[in-house]
Image (spheres, rainbow, N blue to C red):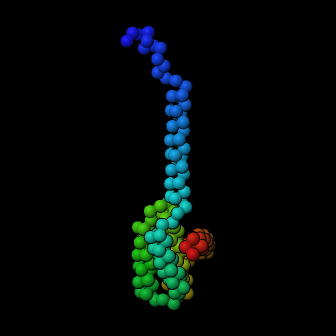
Amino acid sequence: MKVRELLQHEIWSKETSRKILVGFAVFVAALFIVFGTWYEFETHWLTIRERVAAKVALQRIDALQNADSLSDEEFKIRRNEVNSAVDAAGLAARTSKDEMVAAELIMCFMGTESARMDMMKQRWIQEGKLHQSANDRESDYQIELFTDTVARQSCLKLHKELK
């Protein structure tokens, strides 16, 4: 073949450009759909394993919150059980939503422990084993109020989420 004959053949046409652009657009659209689906799954879906583990942990936290009459030893035993359940819920986390629920469980549990510590501190003050100044009482009150509010919000959110 001569060079003149080769140059007369059209190598790249408008139709070829259109096919490439349409193929690229389909690829980008598919990629967008896959990413959007993954994002929704990751941020809004609570896996079954996490839901079950979180329900168990929340039930144990609720039982611990309602057990004001427990001795210190009984409370420690139940606290260890709750701690194990919260850890199991953390290990069951697979998605971002699961991890958020595990963090909320930790906050709820910390509120329960904080309330128990406050109760023990009040008992020690009444027994004369602990003395506090007015400034210490005020700062403790502010900390207790904040901790109680955050823990209560976390527990309410979990109860709503895990119905």
Tell me the residue at 60%/73% (across/down). Answer: 160
Give the quadrant of the N terminus.
top left
Q: Is residue 85 visible?
A: yes
Residue at horizontal 46 percent and vertical 21 percent from the top: 11
Residue 31: horizontal and vertical position, in percent?
50, 45
Looking at the image, the residue that sits furthest to the left is 1
Residue 20 place in picture, x, y as percent: 50, 32
* Among the 4 quarters of the image, the one containing residue 73: bottom left
| Residue at image location 45% in from the left, 78% down from the top | 82
Q: Who's the residue at 52% across and 59% down the image?
A: 41
- Measured along the vertical axis of the image, is residue 100 above or below residue 25? below
Residue 9 location, x and y as percent?
46, 17
Q: Nearer the viewer, residue 136 or 120?
A: 120
Q: What number of labels is visible? A: 0
Along the line of sight, the residue nearer the viewer: 136 or 97: 97
**Front residue of 49 and 104:** 49
Quarter of the figure that contains the C terminus: bottom right
Q: Picture coordinates of residue 64 (x, y %)? A: 50, 83
- Residue 155 visible: no
